[in-house]
Image (spheres, rainbow, N blue to C red):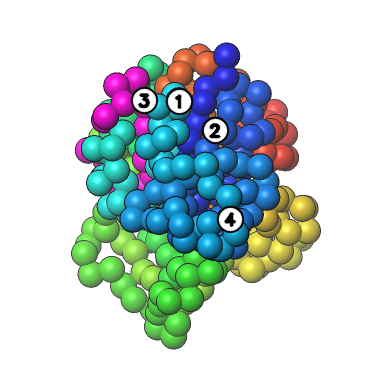
Amino acid sequence: MKVKVVVNGYGTIGKRVADAITKQDDMELIGVTKTRPSYQAKMAVDKGYPLYVSGKGVKDDFIKAGIKVDGRLEDILESADIVVDTTPEKIGKENKDIYLKYSDLKAIWQGGEKASIADASFNALVNYEAAFGKKFVRVVSCNTTALCRTLYAIHKNFDISHITAVIVRRASDPAETEKGPINSLEPSLKVPSHHGPDVQSVMGNIDIETMAIKAPTTLMHLHSVIVTCKKKGVTVSDIISAFESTERIRLFNGWEHIFGTAQIMEFAKDNAFYRGDMMENGVWSDGINIIGSKIYYYQAVHQESIVIPENIDAIRSMFELEKDKYKSMRITDESLGILKNIK
Ligand code: NAD
């Protein structure tokens, strides 16, 4: 039997999660929601996704716009096994009271919500098992997801003692023209930033401090990471091997002429990744170095898509559809066309 999934909030993350669900043999998309008519609402209907009205939305507004709706969110939740909440930050928390009315309904929230909303904060590679059979799970943010992936690869092999990471955040997603800054770099004056504790919500008591800067770009985030390990004698090629053999990390070499986030986005489009998405961490192999006991590396993070495979694995874990995290990730990655061949 397939797990019946509703995606509440058909925006940047929601539309991608919805498409990803339709590619899984063990899941079925039974509805998506919008609050207002828009081209995206019409796109959902054109794709054959049952559309429901959510939040303060009014059904008549959709009908006037000529967009077919099947009812309100509450009409479909009764038939759902799980709702993936992809509404904006803090709205997800308000929605919890709605979900609690359906005793068997499970829910996933995104990184915009606090860790306390769910029974577990999730990253497939680090703690797939933590979501086994759980009712409420939070898939951590794009930045935290990316940090968890590469830090896990290093920690598993070389036993991390300390991490410092500086996060250069994209100012907004490409379509969010109302947000900024458009000509300024804005440091987060809360030092350390919230990203370190968020990594700890998945990786436990790992020693990490982070700082963050908002930059006028919409393409990707960029992390500059410095890691100290307990294991002595680690080499650059050891780190490259660790990244190469880890799921959802893609290394770029100097000869590829990928100088920054612009070329990574072009690479994703040229490789016909759907929507030009890049669901893997992009790590520059030439930018990896070891000085003394410290490992240095940079990684690029496509904020719009990196968490999509994680949402799929979270569902598989919550319903115990697959016990082995590597098998779940492989099923997900093959279905989504994440092309890297793991050795
Ligand atoms: P978004 O604004 O692009 O999409 C949210 C969608 O929810 C919109 O379609 C909006 O109309 C709809 N919505 C608003 N109020 C609603 C309500 N009451 N009920 C149902 N739908 C409602 O937001 P997003 O960027 O997709 O972010 C969603 C979540 O994912 C947030 O928690 C965010 O922090 C997290 N996240 C975002 C990114 C990113 O870079 N975009 C990356 C990782 C995680």
Cα gap from disc 3 to disc 1, whole angstroms: 9 Å
Q: Which residue is mark 1?
A: 79
Which image quarter holds the C terminus?
top right
Q: Mark 3 or mark 1, which has the lower sequence index?
A: 1
Q: Nearer the viewer, residue 127 or 132?
A: 132
> What span is colored magenta in the figure?
100-116
Cα gap from disc 3 to disc 4, whole angstroms: 28 Å
- Does the Cβ of the disc 1 residue fall within 8 Å of ligand 1? no
Residue placed at 51% from the left, 73% from the top? 217
Question: Amino acid under label 3?
Answer: Leu
Q: Which residue is mark 4?
A: 67
| Residue 51 vertical placement versus 56 (above, below) | above
Question: Amino acid under label 4?
Answer: Ile
Q: Which mark is residue 30?
A: 2
Question: Amino acid under label 1?
Answer: Ser
Secondary structure category for the residue under label 3: loop
Q: Is residue 296 visible?
A: no
